[in-house]
Amino acid sequence: MAEEMSAKTHGLGVFLELRKRLQSGLLVVGTSVARGPADVAVTGEGSSLRVRTPGGELRLALPAGVALEGGSCIHTPVGEAGGEELHFRLRITVGRREQDPAGVMETLRTEETYSFHCQGCATRLARGQVGSRVFKRVLPLPNCNWNAIVDEWCCHPDPFANKKLLPRAEDCLLGDTFVLLARDGSCDQTLTEEVSSVGAADAQDSKKPCHRLALISCASCSLVLGEAVAPGTLKLYITQVVVEPAVGDGKLDASLNRSAFLERTVAARLLDLSNSLSSFHFSVQTPDGKVFLLLWLLNGDSIIASVPERLVGEESSISPPAPLSPSLRAARALKLLYISCSDASAQQREIATSWEANSIGHAMVLPLKVCEELLQVLDESNATLPASMRCMRCYEVAYLRL
Ligand SMILES: [Zn+2]
């Protein structure tokens, strides 16, 4: 047991979570960096936090306006749960409220020019007549269950049954995780289309008929971007394309890191959907309606930093000591509980069944590959947490940075 514990916590240097709304925070220091509470000294310096340990000194840059309340950092015993961790509680002051970062859905406006790029290789996708798109209408699509609701409200047969909401030539329709655009001639050079049948493995399940998806991919790097939902209509997922106001030559920084982009895009979307729907439960599904991940948004106001042991000790290992301590940036993040449906335990499967039975969880549809990437991002975040914080009841814990 003790060995298992040490293997799990191996590598933990310093973990910090601040809560803006509560104006408080938790600092966890691994016992490989400091043996006891007396070994740790925490001071604030404007918008940064200095953590001094025998293992080295660390300076964490906090977001503007956030500062440590002097002398508020106190050690709190955690018992067995934090076997190889030292926990400290602290209070912070928060100067001003930061705006939530705007995702692509909040960016798109009418009468402005945008260019759409593949997130994988930065190729411009829809060239249009003037090199980019100007929309006459940018409209949100109704909630994904709107058909069912119409059915409840109409005393006559649903007039919209089997009718899809499709964009006209200069429309941009916004779904929860995608945009719908009319296809134009330029798309033929930059996009490829491939029909794949999904849900075939569930053919016996009469509720989920096998259906075909016309997958749209980038012609230069083959990243799946979305689907052709009707002839002449493109569905592009917001995790797969970069939408930029078209200025100058419209060239895009090709160095965008894939997992960081995915993390930020999904985090911004979750926060926005949670605020507008007052919903904290999300079920991440593939386009054939299979639930892949359950997400429970716990906090939207966290500021976190996770520093592995080797970075804390970096300075002391250099001789003579470097003049500057390593400085790292604490970032805004969402705290999530999650369950991966593909490798769920018996208890987790029970939770998944109850979510499904009670229609808990707003559906967030993403291509299978993206669902897998998202799970990897969550698992990687989970692995950087102190061992005592990695799960909560039957859920795994992760943070998504905004
Ligand atoms: Zn590409």
Image (cartoon, grey):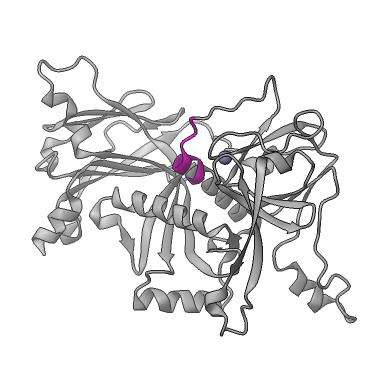
Residue at the spot 48% in from the left edge and 79% down from the top edge: 353
The region drawn magenta spans 255-262
**Which quadrant does the N terminus fall into?**
bottom left
Query: What residue appears at the point 16 percent right and 36 percent down from the top-left corner?
Result: 40
- The answer to if 298 sits in the magenta stretch is no
x and y, in percent, of residue 395 in the image = 37, 65
Q: Do we see residue 292 in this rendering?
A: yes
Q: Is residue 23 left or right of residue 229?
A: left
Please determine whether, in this image, residue 319 is positioned above or below residue 84. Answer: above
Between 116 and 294, the one nearer to me in the picture: 116
User: Is residue 39 left or right of 303 when viewed as pictured?
Assistant: left
Q: Name the side, left or right, on which 239 lies relative to 173.
A: left
> Ligand 1 falls in which quarter?
top right
Residue 69 in picture, x, y percent from top left: 34, 33
Q: Hey, which quadrant is residue 366 in on the image?
A: bottom right
> Which residue is nearer to you in this view: 68 or 160?
160
**Does residue 100 show up?**
no
Is residue 388 positioned above or below 358 on the image? above
Q: Is residue 261 magenta?
A: yes
Nearer-the-camera pick, 254 or 324: 254
Residue at (72% x, 33% y) in the render: 114
Residue 174, given in percent of the width and then of the height, sits at: 72, 50
Is residue 235 left or right of 221 when viewed as pictured? right
Give how far across and how far down residue 290 sits, in percent.
Answer: 55, 70
Viewer-proximal residue, 241 or 333?
241
**Number of labelled discs?**
0
Magenta stretch prevailing secondary structure: helix
